[in-house]
Amino acid sequence: MADYTAFVEAGTALVELLRDQLSPEPVGNRELIALCSPHESENNQLTLYLYHIEEESQNVTVGYYAVGRDLQRMQPARYTLRYLVTAHSKAPAQMKEADQHRVIGAAMQVIRDTPVIPARYLTGSSAREQAELHVMVEKTPLEQLLKIWNNTSKEYKLSFVVMVTGVTIDSKRERRVSRVKEITIDTQPQPDRREGRR
């Protein structure tokens, strides 16, 4: 399974997918798509901000599995990541909204058309373990989106939420187990305990 770097590897894979699909049109330079807070966007046209991590509890195997003759390791944890995807524009005021709408529309199109991030975008432990990262646009109420922006005085910018599932991190917790070395089988018939009862 993937190492503790799985979160950054998932984010990097998502960014690289969008960079390939959105540049040079509608985003002129692939480097203008980045993993960063929408409040610190600098010159970026599209930012992806990991704002929520949730450990999955449904359909998850618990306990330990064998990694050697006398060694077991705790099952890996699975996570769902949520990214706030925000469009930014340096265009003149009369063109800014249209510019942001184009970028957001193109990004949503890519996410919908690519439900699983292709393996070529995976790096590190995620690539080694051939992780299967699923992505989708999550229906998010406007009130929830606004709450993410409420920690600053900056105006709200057009955003949507991308949910990434299939992210796993292997456990380092292990335990030694002893193997059965000897079994005694008694082949003598046992007396019927009902005898002697009245």
Image (cartoon, rainbow, N blue to C red):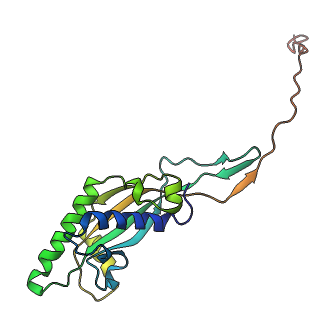
11 to the left or right of 152: right
Question: Above or below — where is 196 with respect to 162?
Answer: above
| Position in image of residue 108 (x %, y %) | 24, 62
Relative depth, front residue between 34 and 173: 34
Residue 129 visible to the viewer: yes
Relative depth, front residue between 112 and 192: 112
Q: Which image quarter: residue 161?
A: bottom left
| Position in image of residue 15 (x %, y %) | 35, 67
Q: Which image quarter: residue 117?
A: bottom left
Quadrant for the N terminus, please.
bottom right
Relative depth, front residue between 7 and 190: 7
Relative depth, front residue between 194 and 1: 1
Residue 78 visible to the viewer: no
Residue ranking furthest to the left: 94
Question: Above or below — where is 137 with respect to 68?
Answer: below
| Position in image of residue 188 (x %, y %) | 91, 15
Name which residue lies at 12% across and 86% down.
92
191 to the left or right of 80: right
